[in-house]
Amino acid sequence: MKQLIQKKAAEYFFYFILYSFIGWVYEVFLEVVVYRWGFSNRGVLFGPYCIIYGVGALILIFTLGGLKKKRICLGRLCITPVLVFIGIVVITTVLELAGSYIMELLYGEWLWDYTRFSFNFQGRVALNPSLRFGVGGMIFLYVFQPLFEKLTARWSDRILYTVSTILALLFLADVIFTLL
């Protein structure tokens, strides 16, 4: 049992780092390519990751992973993906709102401003980004996560622990470096 818990912890930490990195790439892509604002490090740490994406991904895996596997239908129409999408939008919006308050408490500000979007709340959350997170969350849950699960399933426990340990040490060093 202890070994299974250790293995799952290593897998989920690996997923956390992957999704934090993917979130950072997404944010930088928006800034550089879409909005043409130029490059800036979109994370709160030095390294190339946005922690809120990693945390959000784990929350979505834990809360919606079971729902995703069910087949809920209205007549012949399967509505499970619609329910998963709604769940993603709600969860990511709440997470983003909470994240903005935590960042404001810790740093005196948060890293985004949605006042230019319709249907925003204090510039912290807005309908447009929430719907984009819904689409991104669907891609993550239905495309990326199954691929990453297949990848980690192929690895031996030794490889998984080694990769996760190296990533954990790099992440810890970054946290220490950023705080100093």
Image (spheres, grey):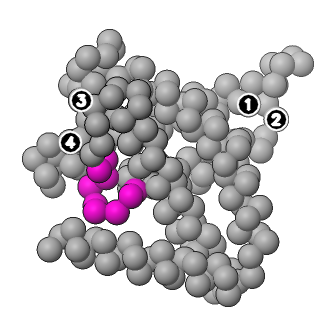
Whole-number angstrom distance, CA of label 3 to CA of label 2: 38 Å
Point out the frontmost of discs 1 and 4.
4
Disc 3 or 2, which lies upstream in sequence? 2
* Residue underneath mark 3: 113
Is residue 109 inside the magenta stretch? Answer: no
Q: Which residue is mark 4?
A: 110
Q: Which mark is residue 117?
A: none
N-terminal of the pair, mark 3 or mark 1, is 1
Residue for badge 1: 80
At 42% from the left and 20% from the top, the residue drawn is 128
Q: Secondary structure at mark 3?
A: loop
Separation of marks 3 and 4 at Cα, in angstroms: 8 Å
Going by the numbered disc 2, the residue's amino acid type is Arg
Label 4: state its secondary structure. Answer: loop
**Whether residue 43 is situated above or below residue 16 in the rendered picture:** above
Residue assigned mark 2 = 71
Amino acid type at circle 4 is Trp
Q: Residue furthest left?
A: 108
x then y, percent, for residue 84: 64, 34
Q: Is 79 displayed left or right of 11 in the figure? A: right
Under circle 2, the secondary element is loop
Q: Quick one: label 2 or label 1, which is nearer the N terminus?
A: 2
Which one is in front in this view, the residue at disc 3 or the one at disc 1?
Answer: 3
Q: Which residue is nearer to you in this view: 2 or 171? A: 171
Residues shaded magenta = 41-49
- Nearer the observer: mark 2 or 4; the answer is 4
